[in-house]
Image (spheres, rainbow, N blue to C red):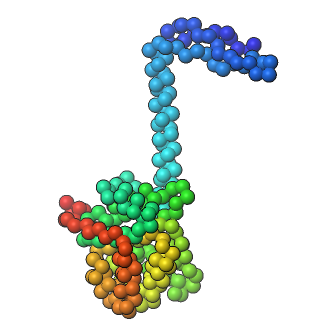
Amino acid sequence: MDFRPTTECPHCGATLKARTTRLAGRTLFCGYEQCGCAGAEAEREKERQAEAEAARKAALDRAMHDWKRAGVPDRYVSLDHPLAAEIAECMKRGQWVYLWGDVGTHKTTCAAAVAKRLAGGKRSVLMAPMYRILDEIQRSFHDGGDPLKRYAEVRYLIVDDLGKRRPTGFVLDSLFSLIDQRYSAMLPTLVTTQYKPSDLVRRLAEQGDPDTAKAIVSRLRGGARVVHFDGPDGRLQ
């Protein structure tokens, strides 16, 4: 044997026997008996806590990577919302979601919390502010390419602040194409907006075709869960 048959507990000095097993005619060392003294128990508890903390940190690192890839803004990573779990489950069942209300009523907080719950594993989710999508559409008018492909094909799409910027006619047509593709493919979509559905139609139609604007909102609204966020602007409290 290349190990000592006994050792002493470093805390109380008790004799601890070696644990062995036989395999293929050889005696294999499997460590020493555990001591039951208070010092040994405290050391094992410290090791368990360190392992649990390491596992928690690894899980958080994986989650942070998933949330960043999904487009969750840094400001909202540590925030949650009481409706988020329920809305995420609705989207997993294929339902669309329409969150509307005045500025500062925590629509984006809720949307980001939903995105965090949908991110990870094989589930693909993408959260983006509407202005960014509009900018990509506008650039494609000159540069070519298909900026909407990833938005159209992702499993869960979360669009923040729809209607904040008035789209031009070309952009409105492209936005209709995106929403219609997702609607036809039954891919769950969540939008946040300051406008109730009827007002959003008017907002989108200010520089574009009213029928196209109506068709967009009809698809967003049809069969969707609509949630009105009210109350004062939380940022001014």
- Please tell me which residue is depicted at 45% across the width and 62% down the height of the picture: 92
Percent x, y of residue 99: 32, 69
- On the question of residue 73 being in view, the answer is no
**Quadrant assignment, res 110:** bottom left
- Please tell me which residue is depicted at 49% across the width and 17% down the height of the picture: 40
- On the question of residue 110 being in view, the answer is yes
**Quadrant assignment, res 104:** bottom left
Q: Residue furthest right?
A: 25
Percent x, y of residue 222: 37, 77
Location of the C terminus (image quadrant): bottom left
Image check: 23 left or right of 36?
A: right
Percent x, y of residue 46: 46, 26
Location of the N terminus (image quadrant): top right
**12 lies above or below 123:** above
Image check: 105 left or right of 19?
A: left
Percent x, y of residue 226: 31, 70
Residues 9 and 210: in front is 210
- Please tell me which residue is depicted at 50% across the width and 39% down the height of the picture: 55
- Please tell me which residue is depicted at 50% across the width and 38% down the height of the picture: 54
**183 lies above or below 232:** below
Across the whole image, how many numbered discs are drawn on residues?
A: 0
